[in-house]
Amino acid sequence: MADEVITGLRELPLLVELGSALVLSSLVGLERELRAKSAGLRTHTLVGVGAALFMLVSKYGFGDVLEFDKVSFDPSWVAAQIVSGIGFIGAGLIFVRRDVVRGLTTAATVWLVAAIGTACGSGLLLLGTATTAVHFLVAVGYPRVLRLMRSALREPQVVRIGYLDGYGVLRNVLTLCTSRGWKVLDLQVEREDTDADEQRTAVVAVHLQGKQPVADLVNDLTELDGVLHASAADSAESGI
């Protein structure tokens, strides 16, 4: 009885490592849960704690066996088995629908949580904490950086529009552009004429930036009343 109590007391410090795996894997799982991913809080937490427990057992669970002569083992093989074994869970999270692969990031996150749990079980708490921080940097920070880069690299488009002046056509043109998700960067009047019937016409170059195909916008503009013609121009030719 006394030996069991002593053994239990020796295991108490290991609860710190197991608890660290619980906290860190729960943080990662909470982020996935809030994003409504297929693997959420419970899955990530169980994977992280399970990996930590496997590592702790491999380190401290065979002390009685090592008392015998000519008995030795390498605890690092358990970490290798965790890496290969977690692949079964990750594979179940990945699916293909209409040639679109989904679930790769969540599967990678489960794999990462297993690594965090293994690190905690090995006593590398600082390394596990740093890896958790890296997860949030990649999962939360990277998408924002990518959106900024795509916005910066997206080349402006130039649409030349000929219309009847004096009928509010230009106002309708700009309203249509913004309603289609385009941002008006600049507007330059290239030509103004008056024909024999004393109708004033004008040609403007509208500098736009957006995600939609500019050809669709041009087609919509040509259908507006008062628009004589519309065409997309090369942004390089327009001095952008």
Image (cartoon, rainbow, N blue to C red):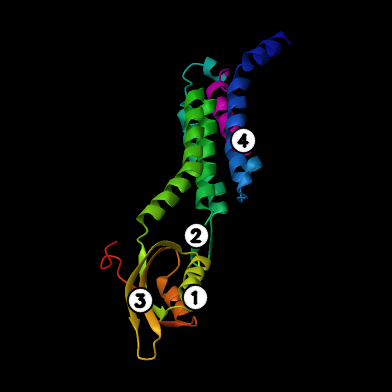
Q: Secondary structure at mark 1?
A: loop
| Residue 101 circle label | 2
Q: Secondary structure at mark 3?
A: strand
Q: Nearer the viewer, residue 150 or 239?
A: 239
Residue at which label 4 appears: 26
For the residues bearing labels 1 and 2, Cβ distance under 8 angstroms: no
Q: 210 above or below 104?
A: below
Tell me where the magenta segment starts and ends, as one range: 46-64
Q: 125 above or below 83?
A: above
Tell me the mark number nearer the camera, choosing from 1 and 2: 1
Which image quadrant for residue 211? bottom left
Residue at which label 1 appears: 168
Residue at which label 3 appears: 203
Three-letter code for the amino acid on which mark 1 is drawn: Gly
Q: Nearer the viewer, residue 170 or 41?
A: 170
- What is the residue that sits farthest to the front in this orientation? 198
The percent coordinates of residue 142 (x first, y second) are: 45, 45
